[in-house]
Image (cartoon, rainbow, N blue to C red):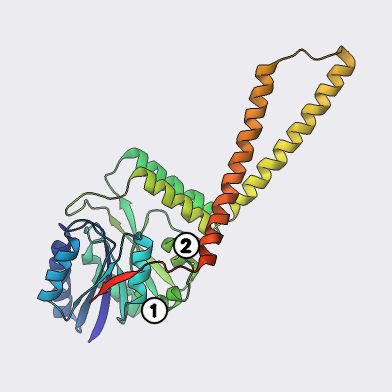
Amino acid sequence: MKTITLIVPCYNEQESINLFYETVEKVFNSMNQEKENYRPDYLFVNDGSSDNTLSVLHELNQKDPENVHLISFSRNFGKESAIAAGLRNAHGDFVALMDVDLQDPPELLPQMLKIIETENYDCVGCVQTSRKQNPVRAFLSSSFYHVIDYLSSVNIKPNVRDYRLMSRQYVDAVNDLTEYNRFSKGIFSWIGFDTKYIEYKGRDRAAGETHWSLFQLLDYSIEGIIDFSDAPLKLATLVGIISCICAVIGIIFITIRALIFGGAVAGWPSLVSIMLLIGGLQLFCLGILGKYIGKVYLETKHRPQYIIKEHK
């Protein structure tokens, strides 16, 4: 019997956990009737939830102690830390990364498993083709994938989800990357290996509400771009060069005009505007540089990505 570890990050998901467990159990029962047996190994990662998520996980663990395991953080460290903790504590022959809200259809697991076992792929990822969401969020999401694909050296498919099934070798390769600042979609693409993507139509959450605000998604996108591209640094350099060239051209123009037509007419509004423009460009470039320095600072401190308070 082969084991499939299901890594399930949870943050304030008390309504979804039992629904998720029951749905996945049905999928495994159906799958085991058709082929050799596969055992689900649930690994729920409680990311410092403030509701009853941990209590629900304890009840589920008592109900099925052989197959249901949990990791609980000392506080909220973020989804990337929850994914990292899950991958490092997953011991199955195959490892699946799933969201507990059932937006990732568990019914795809048999198809994903068949692809890995019969077509010699190391990973099967999922791409969402359609989903009802705010038009602004949809536009920003689509734009992010195009931007990061253009700027970075790794190829990240548009609308790819965290939902994927991975071989043991694939997971071990991901675990070899120990950086503090993590962007999983980029890491999964960076390590290579043969990966196949399947498409599915987006689903609504089974219960509860999303915990990702528009600002958090935007910040996450910026972090992803910075983690896998030095293009922003090149942009800052380019902006500085263009500013210097414009300044030199402006000085030459003012000098020639003063020699030919005499003293220039005083115009403090235009002067202030130019100063604000240059100052803004300088702060913009310093901000980009500061983001990279901040990441280097966090890496050099060698702090753990998460602290586990409880592990069952």
Q: Residue furthest bottom?
A: 1
Q: Viewer-proximal residue, 179 or 221?
A: 179
Q: At label 1, which amino acid type do we have?
A: Asn
Q: Viewer-proximal residue, 252 or 120?
A: 252
- Placement of the N terminus among the 4 image quadrants: bottom left
Residue occupied by mark 2: 181
Residue occupied by mark 1: 120
Q: At label 2, which amino acid type do we have?
A: Asn
Residue at figure coordinates x 43%, y 48% from the top left = 219
Task: Give the mark nearest the N terminus, 1 or 2.
Answer: 1
Give x and y (percent) for residue 264. Answer: 80, 15
Residue 165 shows in this picture = no
Residue at figure coordinates x 57%, y 50% from the top left = 290
- Please name which of the two marks, 1 or 2, marks the residue nearer to the observer: 2
Give x and y (percent) for residue 124. Answer: 36, 69
Residue 62 shows in this picture = yes
How packed is label 1: few (under 14 Cα within 10 Å), some, or many (20 or more)? Answer: few
* Marker count (numbered): 2
Residue 275 placement: quadrant: top right
Q: Viewer-proximal residue, 58 or 30?
A: 58
Residue at figure coordinates x 67%, y 47% from the top left = 237
Residue at figure coordinates x 54%, y 66% from the top left = 300
Q: Are marks 1 and 2 in contact (CB under 8 Å)?
A: no
Q: Viewer-proximal residue, 196 or 265?
A: 265
How packed is label 2: few (under 14 Cα within 10 Å), some, or many (20 or more)? Answer: some
Quote the CA–CA distance across marks 1 and 2: 31 Å
- As helix, strand or loop, the secondary structure at mark 1 comes to loop
Give x and y (percent) for residue 61. Answer: 15, 74
- As helix, strand or loop, the secondary structure at mark 2 comes to loop
